[in-house]
Amino acid sequence: MNYQDQMLAGKNPVELVVALYDGMLRFLSEAIAAVERGDVSARRISIKYVFDILMHLQSRLRMDVGGTSAQSLSEFYAAIFALCLEGSRLSSVARLEEAMACIRDVREAWTVAAREPEVLALLERESQEPVMSGAGDEEQMAGARWSA
């Protein structure tokens, strides 16, 4: 078991989502650094990792369970995707920083949710059936090369 696997072991699904948000922030920082030094290839690679995380999060939303919250997250992921696409296409540090600010805000909400007693109780009750479908995939995704 490597260091990243050890960090992720024992995390609940919400904490794993936070780790994926941290990954997006890290890769957006790398994309900004690539824009600033004019490294088109590195920018594209970093943005691709952000897109991979966004698509993973989007694909794991449970619209049947999450209702309006899941719909809001779906719209959020689409908006971040668009901001990152535009930021990459235009080599716009401002657009990429805007995406980072939005991600930080929602990440903070996930962090607060992970500490809420009601959320923790729900996660404990649902331990047989994860809150997000494919919760094991979050751990796998968070442990991949582009993890937090």
Image (cartoon, rainbow, N blue to C red):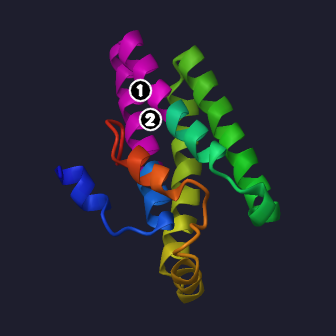
Q: How many marks?
A: 2
- Rendered residue at 69%/47% (across/down): 76
Segment tinted magenta in the rendering: 21-50
Closest to the observer: 34 or 139?
139
- Rendered residue at 59%/81% (across/down): 122
Closest to the observer: 46 or 65?
65
Does 43 appear in magenta? yes
Q: Would you say the residues marked 2 and 1 are in contact, meaning their CB atoms lie under 8 Å apart?
A: yes
User: Residue beneath label 1, please?
Assistant: 46
- When the figure is inspected, residue 33 is found, relative to residue 55, above or below; the finding is above
- Rendered residue at 24%/51% (across/down): 4
Please provide percent x and percent y for residue 108: 52, 64
**Label 1 Cα neighbours within 10 Å, binned few <14 / some 14-19 / many ≥20:** many
Residue type at the position of mark 2: Leu
At mark 2, the secondary structure is: helix
Please provide percent x and percent y for residue 16: 44, 59
Residue type at the position of mark 1: Ser
Mark identifier at residue 63: none
Distance from disc 2 to disc 1, alpha carbons, whole Å, reads 7 Å
- Rendered residue at 39%/47% (across/down): 140
| Front tag of 2 and 1 | 1
Which of the two labelled residues, at mark 2 and mark 1, occupies the earlier sequence position?
2
Closest to the observer: 28 or 71?
71
User: Residue beneath label 2, please?
Assistant: 28
Does 90 appear in magenta? no
Task: Using residue 46 as the reference point, say whether residue 9 is left or right of it.
Answer: left
Please provide percent x and percent y for residue 20: 45, 50
